[in-house]
Image: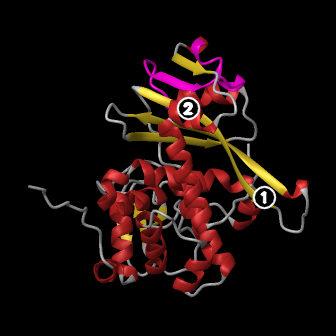
Amino acid sequence: MRHARTYPHILSVTEFAQHFGTPEQCLAALQRARWPDGFVCPVCGQRQAVFCAPRRLFQCCACRRQTSLTAGTIFHKSRIPLPKWFWALYQFAHDKKGCSARLLSKQLQVCYPTAWLMAHKIRQAMAADPPAVLAALIELDDAFLGGVQPGRRGRGARYKAPLLLAVERLPDGRLGQAAIEAVAQLRQTRVAAFAKRCFAPAAQIRSDAAGGFLQLAAQGFKHVPAKIGPDRRRAVRYLPAVHLLIANLKRFLLGRHHSLAPKHACRYVGEFVCRFNHRTHEESLFEHVLTLGTKLQAITYPELVAAELR
């Protein structure tokens, strides 16, 4: 007898409006996410404080420093009401295709540059999610994502963003945790730093015989490279998990955003990885993204426009 499949409980639109429909409800949720064990002064670390309701500030009883609920978060100095911010967070957390700035602009009734900045602030928070430490059998590969530059034609019109991708392949063939990093160039030093940060010391790594991967054995990893060549079918047979990850990433980007600029690739990739690694805990992903947003200083529009891929 087949058992009915159970799905995680995710807030419906009606339930979301009941929980986060007013600024007061959003402020209360923001306070719980930022200080789950009670207020902590960011200067002296003391917990005793007085709340000034008219200005929505906490004043530390020790150093008398005043702290806003939104200071030091992605909501800092934003004129957008918190309920609209929370709806944007909800969209990013629970739609596996993400949310485009154009759609966000229509839903929140804000101009496109404002929606674009909000979207990248949320992506930056999701990209700040601590990277998973991959263990057991890891498949490693590189990929190039990009699009066409506006106003350019011919062969020089296309640009590519190099990516390093790794994913656990579980014994039953399913995909485990993943790690993806956007880089300026696929060098051995970047691959080594990526492996040191994201791989467990006893992990076994499978990859092709690309030059950037050949120093992993010298770092102490159990590395099994294979000379695959240009045969894509052979590559998919040898590295099925990481190629499935690449296909999912490309479908996410092409289905919603169509293309991406290399200097913003780290945030789009971070959004995808955060959702992917928390896919088994989808019911708590909104709260997780909200908590990430309280721990990150918001990027400004000039910084975002001037950002460069490192």
Residue occupying the point 59% across, 20% down: 225
The answer to whether one can see residue 32 in this image is yes
The answer to whether one can see residue 48 in this image is no
The extreme left residue here reads: 1
Eyeballing the image, is 17 above or below 212? below
Would you name the residue on which mark 1 appears?
306
Q: The disc labelled 2 sits on which kind of residue?
A: Leu
In this image, 47 relative to 207: left or right?
left
Would you name the residue on which mark 2 appears?
140
Eyeballing the image, is 241 above or below 155? above
The spot of residue 295 in percent (x, y) is 48, 54
Residue occupying the point 87% across, 58% down: 157
User: What secondary structure is found at the residue carrying circle 1?
Assistant: helix
Eyeballing the image, is 133 above or below 114? above
Residue 220 is labelled as: none
Task: Please check the rendered image and state whether residue 170 is part of the magenta-colored stretch, yes or no.
Answer: no
The Cα–Cα distance between marks 1 and 2, rounded to whole angstroms, is: 31 Å
Eyeballing the image, is 204 above or below 255? above
Q: In this view of the protein, which residue sits in the foreground, 236 or 170? A: 236
Q: In this view of the protein, which residue sits in the foreground, 73 or 199? A: 199
Quadrant location, the C terminus: top right
In this image, 220 relative to 10: left or right?
right
User: What secondary structure is found at the residue carrying circle 2?
Assistant: strand
Q: Which residues are magenta?
A: 198-217
Q: The disc labelled 1 sits on which kind of residue?
A: Ala
The spot of residue 284 in percent (x, y) is 31, 59
Sequence-first disc among 1 and 2: 2
